Amino acid sequence: MTKNTIDTESVPASELIDQTIKALGDWRGETLARLRALIKQADPDVVEEVKWRKPSNAMLGVPVWEHDGMICTGETYKAAVKLTFAKGASVEDPSGLFNSSLDGNTRRAIDFQKDDAINEEAFKALVRTAVALNTSQVGKKPKKA
């Protein structure tokens, strides 16, 4: 284990996300924490996971929020906090929050920059719509071509 790597084998996902937020120590951590709180408000039954743990992210991984499937991931970059909605292309976005990854057939993302305001009600509505899409597809088998 290197100096910057945290032993994360037995740490619950929620604690890893807490550690990620704390390790950022700047506006990105504050933004990710706020978005996380809004996701939990929008869906009290959301499950937090951490995926893609590797040395380049100090083995903390990428926060993932799920409810009957993946809702979104929360990645941080130097100039943005990116929430990528797994089925975003199928999620109605009447407030126009999606501003990234708009060309794909499946995903859509929202990039939040340093001083961006968060439209909290629209964001929570978007999360609820993504959850509704996931729950509507539970038990349905994909059609074979």
Image (cartoon, rainbow, N blue to C red):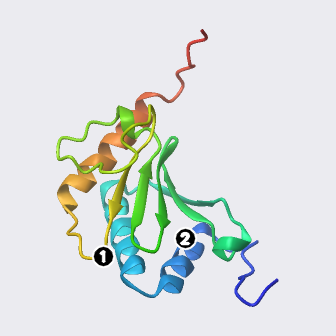
Residue extending farthest to the right is: 1
Task: Name the element at disc 1.
Answer: loop
* Quadrant the N terminus occupies: bottom right
| Amino acid bearing label 1 | Lys
- Point out residue 12 in the picture as x, y percentages from the top left corner: 63, 70
Residue extending farthest to the top is: 145
Q: Is residue 90 above or below residue 144?
A: below
Q: Is residue 52 left or right of residue 32?
A: right
Q: Is residue 64 above or below residue 36?
A: above
Residue at the location (18% across, 57% down)? 121
Residue at the location (30% across, 51% down)? 99
Q: Earlier in the sequence, mark 2 or mark 1?
A: 2
Q: Is residue 96 left or right of residue 104?
A: left
Query: Pointer 2 and pointer 1: residues touching (CB < 8 Å)?
Result: no
Q: Which mark is residue 74?
A: none
Q: Callout 1: 10 Å neighbours few (<14), some, many (20+)? A: some
- Point out residue 6 in the picture as x, y percentages from the top left corner: 71, 82
Q: Is residue 3 left or right of residue 101?
A: right
- Point out residue 116 in the picture as x, y percentages from the top left corner: 23, 70
Task: Name the element at disc 2.
Answer: helix
Q: What separation in Å lies between label 2 and label 1 (alpha carbons)?
A: 24 Å
Q: Is residue 46 left or right of residue 130?
A: right
* Quadrant the C terminus occupies: top right
| Amino acid bearing label 2 | Ser
Residue identified by numbered label 1: 114
Residue identified by numbered label 2: 14
Q: Callout 2: 10 Å neighbours few (<14), some, many (20+)? A: some
> Which of the two residues, 20 or 3, is positioned nearer the viewer here?
3
Residue extending farthest to the bottom is: 3
Task: For marks 2 and 1, give the one nearer the viewer.
Answer: 1
- Point out residue 27 in the picture as x, y percentages from the top left corner: 36, 81
Residue at the location (73% across, 72% down)? 55
